[in-house]
Image (tube, rainbow, N blue to C red):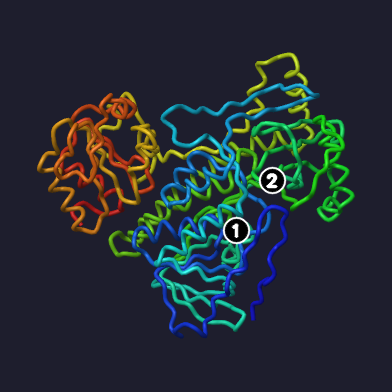
Amino acid sequence: MHQPHAEPRRSIYYDYQVFDAWRPSLHPAEQHAPVVIAGAGPIGLVTALALAQQGVRCVVLEAERQVSEGSRAIVFTRRSMEILQQVGVARRVTENGLPWRFGNSIYRGQRVYRMENPHDPDDRFFPLINLQQQYLEQYLVEACAEQPLVDLRWGNQLRSFTQDGQGATLEVDTEEGPYTLQADWLVAADGARSAVRALMDLKLEGASYEGRFVIADIRVDLPLPTERLAFFDPDWNPGNTILMHREPHGIWRLDYQLPPGETPEDALQPESLKARIDAQLAMIGHAGAPWALDWCSVYSARALTLPDYLHGRVLFVGDAAHLLPIFGVRGANTGFQDAQALAWRLALVARGVAPASLLQSYSSERVGAAREIIDEAGKSTRFMAPPTRGFRLLRDAVLSLSLSQPFVGPLYHWRTSRPHEYGASSLNAVDDDNARFTAGPGHGAPPRNVCLGEDDHLLDHLDHRFTLLCATETGIPAEWLAAVAELRAQGLPLQLIAVGARQPVPGADQTLPDADGHLRERHGLTNGGAYLLRPDQHVCARWTALDAPRLRAAVWSACGLNPGT
């Protein structure tokens, strides 16, 4: 029988709650769910909430009875915040997190590069925001508790499963013993040490770098701004790299590289931690500052992915699908994009509206994104933690030159996580006017957010449906409205937003006046033009002049349907 920890984890800033274990004796013997999600980390919970918002019931299995230990993922990008906005927790993250824009690279006491992430008045969210993962998980758990279609089962450990063409049969262990759970689909969101991946004997592909880093969260009072600090080749840790981030509640994250050959066990000894943390504080001018350790761990930089995220009735998201270096805040932020990309497809398939073959496009898009990220992350990792003598010589040459030659500064850039653009997706329209646009986001890109007024932005108006964004100052042609009604009758979720009219447009779900034309300008729209956005907010078609047949074809194509089905 599975016996998860029943005592709250210890922390100097976070109060852990132990949730009641889900007991099979209190529920029917026959258990079935359209979707079962293994893992209640941020990625699994976002997937569950997104599915529920689209009317799909899911069971979330979590072996533990409390949220994760330690701060773990702490930096969330603007795109992640837009995804968290879709599932209803972005405001709480904004209220409690620390926004920032700048990153500093320091060598021999000199700032040799300052990275600035762009931010303009149209952005609702800052480029980056720091918040410990426990808080984000708490907000997501509380959102799930308010969502009747999410069944979160604490203290339930997936032990084994089998699958066939109809679904999966899961054996789940609890403190009362095991029970059987039937699922039409199983989503593996169970992290870097994925039990689902191990049970299927699936192998990740890519590179594992030998360099190890210690993460140490400490409470210390430092009069420094919320900016990323990267220190290269410091005297107390020669040849290696140290990162620092401010976190809420007076906590600072230190990541420092270990010399070759040092074991994680030795690195986490109290005397080793104290010596190195004291040395880092002294180096930045705060020798003797009192500090207290909250949590520490050791990690290795890895750039790995499964070659396919779809295996029969099993789908992989987040760290279960790929392992990415932290340089560039890619791990959780990439996982959120996985969850968003999967949920709308899986909802259509689970509801019988789209064919199961639609899920293959999830795998191809997200594997492609992971491989692109791995290529970028590899460059950052080889600079932060050179894996060979040759890479170290190159890095050291850049360090030396940067003291006097500003042109090498951009080589320090850590290539921050960004939204992937699915320009080659099979779901993009083939006969639209994408090539004729001279402005705005093209195929596969997310739309550009636009400030419409006080506390009002374009992305606030997008939900988990397809969105037809039409530029009109008068009304919507009857044939467009008929096509929209026909698509809805087929079970395809579609909202119509009119942009540019002064008064509410009949037939439109929403009307955005856009009096100054700024929204249309940012998207290259003129009267009669339109964008079709997928439920994950990526462009799949755009027209300078829309007509009903092309609208139908674009929506069918984006859902993996043949014309007329």
Q: Quadrant of residue 101?
A: top right
Residue 22: percent from the left, percent from the top? 54, 76
180, 85: nearer the viewer: 85
**Where residue 360 sits: x, y (%)?**
41, 55
Q: Which residue is mark 2?
A: 301
What amino acid is at disc 2? Answer: Ala
Asked whether the viewer can see residue 215, the reply is: no
Q: Does the image show residue 492? A: yes
Q: Which residue is mark 1?
A: 191
Q: Which corner quadrant of the image does residue 18 belong to? A: bottom right
Crowding near the residue tagged with mark 2, few <14, some 14–19, many ≥20 C-alpha atoms within 10 Å:
many
Judge from the rendering whether residue 345 lies leftward or rightward of residue 541; answer left or right.
right
Residue 196 appears left or right of 342: right
Q: Residue at x 55, y 63 (%)?
A: 39
Question: Element under label 2?
Answer: strand
Relative image position of residue 547 (x, y in whole percent): 16, 38
Which of the two labelled residues, at mark 1 and mark 2, occupies the earlier sequence position?
Answer: 1
Quadrant including the C terminus: bottom left
Residues at discs 1 and 2 in contact (Cβ within 8 Å):
no
**Which residue corresponds to the image point at 71% horizontal and 21% vertical from the top-left?**
112
Label 1 neighbourhood size at 10 Å, few (<14), some (14-19), many (20+)? Answer: many
- State which mark lies toward you, 1 or 2: 1
Inter-mark Cα distance, 1 to 2:
15 Å
* Three-letter amino acid code at the position of disc 1: Gly
* Total numbered badges shown on the rendered structure: 2
Quadrant showing the N terminus: bottom right
Q: Position of residue 288 (x, y in %)?
A: 87, 37
Picture quadrant where residue 328 is located = top right
Give the answer, above or below, for where 73 lies relative to 225.
below
Secondary structure type for disc 1: loop
Mark identifier at residue 517: none
